[in-house]
Amino acid sequence: MRWAVLLAATCVSVAVAGSENRSFDGSGNNLQHPDWGRAGTRLLRLAGVDYADGVAAPSGAQRPGPRVISNQLCAQHDSVTNDAGASSFLWQWGQFVDHDIDLTPGAVPAEPLPIAIPAGDPSFDPEWTGEQSISFQRSAYDPSSGTGTDNPRRQLNVITSFIDASNVYGSDAGRARALRKLDGTGRLATSHGTQFLP
C-alpha cells in the first residue's frame, strides 16, 4: 500500500497541448507553464548559492574534501540491513529515476576541478604518496548566467525533468532516432544482439 501511495504521489499527468503524444523535450507537459521541465532549461534551485565569490567560483576549500567524506560515510565492516526490508534494488531504482529527471554534461571547454585524495586512501593512494587525485570536471552552465551576485552560475538540464523514461526513449528527436531500430516496428535497438540498450 505504501508503494501505491508513493507511485500515485509521483506520477505526472501528461497532457500535451494540441497533441496526442508527448513531446520528446517535455515541452507542453505543464499546461500552465509549457516550458517548465523542458530539456535544455535551467535546473531548479531550491536553496541559495554557495559559490566562493557568490557568482561561480568553487567553494569548500576549508571543508573536508569529497573523498574524505565518502571514505567516512561508506566505511562499513559489517553488512547493514534495511529496517524496512528493502533490497539493493531500491537504490538502483532511485538511480534510474535520478537519471530520468536530470543530466548536466561537463563544461565545454572543460573546467577541471580535481578531487584531492587523502594520503593512504586504500583505493586511490595505497602507496601513501599524498599526490593522487580523482579527475572531475565542472558542469556545463547557462552562458547567460554567472555574470554577478544577482545572476550566479546556473546549470542546464539536457533531458526532461519529468519521470517519463526519457533516459530510455530520448529527450530530443536525434537521440530518440539513435535509440531505435528504424525497421518500422518501433522497437528500440539493442547492443550486439543482446537484450540491453545501446
Image: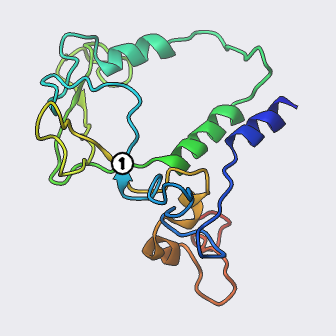
Residue pictured at 61% horizontal, 56% vertical: 164
The reply to whether residue 198 is in sight is: no
Residue pictured at 38% horizontal, 17% vertical: 122
Q: Is residue 61 above or below residue 28?
A: above
Q: Nearer the viewer, residue 38 or 80?
A: 38
Label 1 CA crowd tier, 10 Å (few <14, some 14–19, many 20+): some
Q: Is residue 194 left or right of residue 47?
A: right
Q: Can you give x and y, in whole percent of width and height, for residue 183 in the image?
A: 63, 89
Q: Can you give x and y, in whole percent of width and height, for residue 146 in the image?
A: 16, 40
Q: Nearer the viewer, residue 51 or 124?
A: 51
Spot the residue most to the front: 32
Task: Report which quarter residue 10 is drawn in.
Answer: top right
Q: Can you give x and y, in whole percent of width and height, for residue 149 in the image?
A: 14, 30
Spot the residue most to the bottom: 184
The reply to whether residue 45 is in sight is: yes
Q: Which residue is mark 1?
A: 104
Q: Is residue 57 above or below residue 140?
A: above
Q: Can you give x and y, in whole percent of width and height, for residue 83 in the image?
A: 77, 14
Task: Report which quarter residue 190 is drawn in.
Answer: bottom right
Q: Quadrant of the N terminus?
A: top right
What's the residue type where badge 1 is placed? Thr
Spot the residue most to the right: 1
Label 1: state its secondary structure.
Answer: loop
Q: Is residue 144 left or right of residue 29?
A: left
Q: Is residue 39 above or below residue 174?
A: above
Residue pictured at 66% horizontal, 50% vertical: 12
Residue pictured at 27% horizontal, 26% vertical: 49
